[in-house]
Amino acid sequence: MSTEPVPAALIFDDPLDQPSSDDTDTAWGDRPTPAGSAADLARFLDEKPPHHV
């Protein structure tokens, strides 16, 4: 009987078939957006530059 470890199996799947965490908006720091014009206005007011007051 041998005590050598069994080598790991090779996996030949395409890694680009599955989305990574960077493929979503939340991975880039965006928060989930609620639907509606009030939410759009709130986001606009939150994200506008200070010189656009």
Image (cartoon, rainbow, N blue to C red):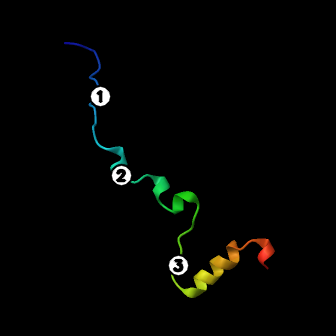
On the image, the x and y values in percent for residue 24 come to 47, 60
Say above or below: 14 vs 37.
above
Say above or below: 37 vs 24.
below
Is residue 25 left or right of 18 when viewed as pictured?
Answer: right
Q: Quadrant of residue 50?
A: bottom right
Tell me the residue at 52%/62% (across/down).
Answer: 26
Q: How packed is label 1: few (under 14 Cα within 10 Å), some, or many (20 or more)? A: few
Q: Nearer the viewer, residue 47 or 2?
A: 47
Give the residue number, with chain letter if any, for mark 1: 8
Q: Earlier in the sequence, mark 3 or mark 2?
A: 2
Give the residue number, with chain letter if any, for mark 3: 34
Mark 3 to mark 2 CA distance (whole Å):
26 Å
Q: Are marks 2 and 1 in contact (CB under 8 Å)?
A: no
Mark 3 to mark 1 CA distance (whole Å):
45 Å
Tell me the residue at 77%/77% (across/down).
Answer: 52
Q: Amino acid at mark 1?
A: Ala
Q: Secondary structure at mark 1?
A: loop
Q: Amino acid at mark 2?
A: Gln
Q: Earlier in the sequence, mark 3 or mark 1?
A: 1
Q: Earlier in the sequence, mark 2 or mark 1?
A: 1
Tell me the residue at 57%/87% (across/down).
Answer: 37
On the image, the x and y values in percent for residue 28 come to 56, 58
Q: Secondary structure at mark 2?
A: loop
Give the residue number, with chain letter if any, for mark 2: 18
